[in-house]
Image (cartoon, rainbow, N blue to C red):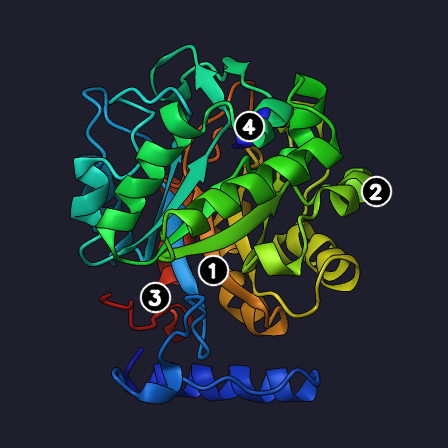
Amino acid sequence: MTGRHAGGGPAGRLAVALAAVGALTAGIGVWATVAEGDDRCAPDARLVAPCGAWWGAYIPYDSDSSLTRPVLAFEKKIGRRLDLVYTYHDMSGNELDGTLLTPDERALGRDRMLMLAWESTVWKEPHHAGYTETQLGWKTIASGRYDTEILDPQIRRIKDYGKRVFLSFDQEADARIKEGAGTPAEYVAAYRHLHERFRKLGADNVVWVWTVSGYLGSADTMKQLYPGDDYVDWIGMDQYNYHLCHGTSKWLDFDRSQRPSYDWLRKNISADKPVMLSEFSTAPDPKRPERQRDWYTAIPEVAPTLPEVKAYVHWNRAVPGPGCDLTVDSGPGLEGYRIAGQDPYFHQDVPGD
């Protein structure tokens, strides 16, 4: 969670053709947009869409703890349905934040995919409002102490849901070490233990996403945190253009904000796993507001040159600090994000099972 870090018409067909030619010239192959229902574009068992990428977002709860209402309102603003809705849960087991697959998630999941981030913490405020929490500890999770009370009831709920869901355990694990969660070896043990609990209870409808910040200053740590190819289906990364947020000043366009971490993960972790931009966004530039729009409108051009990025999940929540409004709820940011989301590359048939 980022609080941890301080055309179907002629014109559309032409744009697709030009993008394909550009991709071929770059030596990365050609993607094609085909008619809806074409089996060549059907997602596989890992929920990888071969003809493009999923378009998703994390949307904060309403003040009355509704998730359905803000998601539908956001979709109305952007002029399309999200493919994927990303939600976060702690391990409190309470109804508000500790119950995986709430009634709202189930309702949204009827015609969208769900991505569940499960944190080995107990939040001190509803919906992690102030980013304060109590760590349960990776060593304790791996020991099995919480299996009966915390893990197994939620695993059974996911199993009973039946539909495939993405699941991330302690996303941005590289940023959690300094918070007292444990060592990289303890994280690997906890991740594998959770994976085995799902397997033991027969919850085979989970697609496993291993999510790190992607911050290359933590490169050695990220290598140590990888649970292994047998335990991971997707690799997730959370990279931003913070600009003035968190005391930075450099402006990174979409490509420069994402490609270095993407290339590093592909080279150093796995060249075979699909990649999810599990959180991405840009802060605004108050002196040049059009920059925020252009940051998003560049995504469809860049996407085919990052061919293994198969899901783009926007972080649509402001975080503490000046200049840290990462939302696209209005203005140039909304305009750019709306334009990007209309591109055929991000229009794939969402699986119904």
The residue tagged 1 is 311
Left or right of 260? Residue 277 is left
Front: mark 1 or 4: 4
Q: Are marks 3 and 4 in contact (CB under 8 Å)?
A: no
Question: At 44% across and 51% down in the image, what residue appears?
Answer: 199
Which disc is residue 342 wearing?
Answer: 3
Question: At 51% across and 23% down in the image, what residue appears?
Answer: 145
Percent from the top left, x then y, of residue 27?
70, 85
Q: Distance between the residues labelled 2 and 1?
A: 25 Å
Percent from the top left, x then y, of residue 43?
38, 74
Q: How far apart are marks 3 and 2 (CA)?
A: 38 Å
The answer to which of 123 and 68 lies nearer the viewer is 123
Percent from the top left, x then y, of residue 7?
31, 77
Above/below status of 202 relative to 243: below
Mark closer to the chain start, 1 or 3: 1
Front: mark 2 or 4: 4
The residue tagged 4 is 141
Left or right of 85? Residue 209 is right
Above/below status of 276 relative to 29: above
Q: Distance between the residues labelled 3 and 4?
A: 42 Å
Q: How far apart are marks 1 and 3 (CA)?
A: 15 Å
Percent from the top left, x then y, of residue 158?
30, 45
